[in-house]
Image (tube, rainbow, N blue to C red):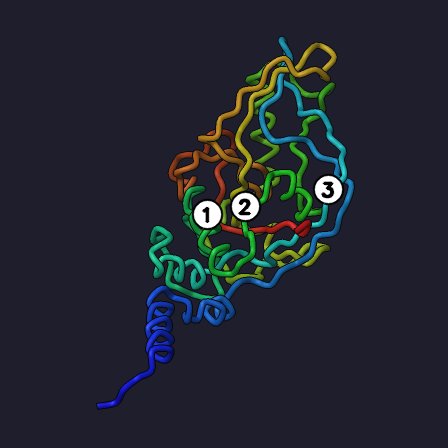
Amino acid sequence: MKLYTPVLLITLLGAALLAREGWFSHDADRAADLPVPPTVIVPAMRLDYRPAGQYQTARQVIDPPLDTRAMPPLAVMETHVSEALYGLCVDDGACRPAPGRGRDDHAQVFVSFADTEQFALWLADRTGTDWRLPTDREWAQLAAEAFHDDALGIDGGPADPAARWLAAYESQFAQRGDADGTHHPLGHFGANSLGVRDLGGNIWEWTQSCNERVTLGPDRSAVLSKVENCGVRVAQGRHRAYIIDFVRDARGGGCAIGIPPDYLGIRLVHSLDG
């Protein structure tokens, strides 16, 4: 019978406990094996931006006022999250299953806002990088020339709310074009000037921004009231869309305002300020 010294016995018991608690796991290797899309660095810039939401004065529905501010640099996924990467989150029990065939060259679509939040938390945990959804303002930054201003012209747009909403609908339809039901491979729609791909395609991307209804004073500078509805989130693509947060396929209903997207997908960012 082989005898162990007390020190050796304690060492062996400690190693067994560490192994049981996962200290000898291969988390780093598992993270390295994840098919995370390449990252594009979006430079700091001064951004001319009209906030998402519905703005009005006491008598007229108006365009959001132009907001110009400096934006810090940002890291963004070059392409959408693939079916294969999302499927790993499902396999880990951290994400809800979604339609798809586990392909590494097709974006995961038919995902709700809650799905994207769960996926971002899982990916951040697996990689040690603080992945998250962009805000609508950050999406405008990373989209560059692919970002579309929703403005109809504050002074030239219809004063009647119904007429203005109809004009906005027609503007979105012109930007969107005909519905495209084809699930194209990643990269099919090319890249913008920063190297971010498929921004002009048929997949809209969830942002973390909530829908807002804002009433401005007569001079359109002072905010008289603001109502935030986070049950409706902003999705970005060829135009802004306002989608109920639990909806996976806005084509079948759930687009709160305007024309529904063809597909809903995931593109995540992380900050570069530490």
Taking depth in this image into account, of 24 and 240 the one nearest to the observer is 24
Q: Residue at x 34, y 61 (%)?
A: 91
Position of 60 relative to 83 (above/below)? above
- Residue under label 2: 133
Between 249 and 28, the one lying in front of the other is 28
Q: Residues within 10 Å of mark 2 (few under 14, many from 20)?
A: many
Q: Label 2 is placed on what type of residue?
A: Leu
Q: Which residue is mark 3?
A: 71
- Asked whether the residues under the numbered discs 1 and 2 touch, taking CB atoms below 8 Å apart as contact, a structural biologist would say yes
- 92, 189: nearer the viewer: 92
CA–CA distance in space, label 3 to label 1:
24 Å
Mark 3 residue element: strand
Q: Position of residue 16 (x, y in %)?
A: 33, 72
Q: CA distance from mark 1 to mark 2?
A: 8 Å
The residue lying furthest to the front in this view is 6
Are there few (<14), some (14-19), or many (20+) residues within 10 Å of tag 3?
some
Relative vertical location of residue 153 with respect to residue 13 in this rendering, above or below = above
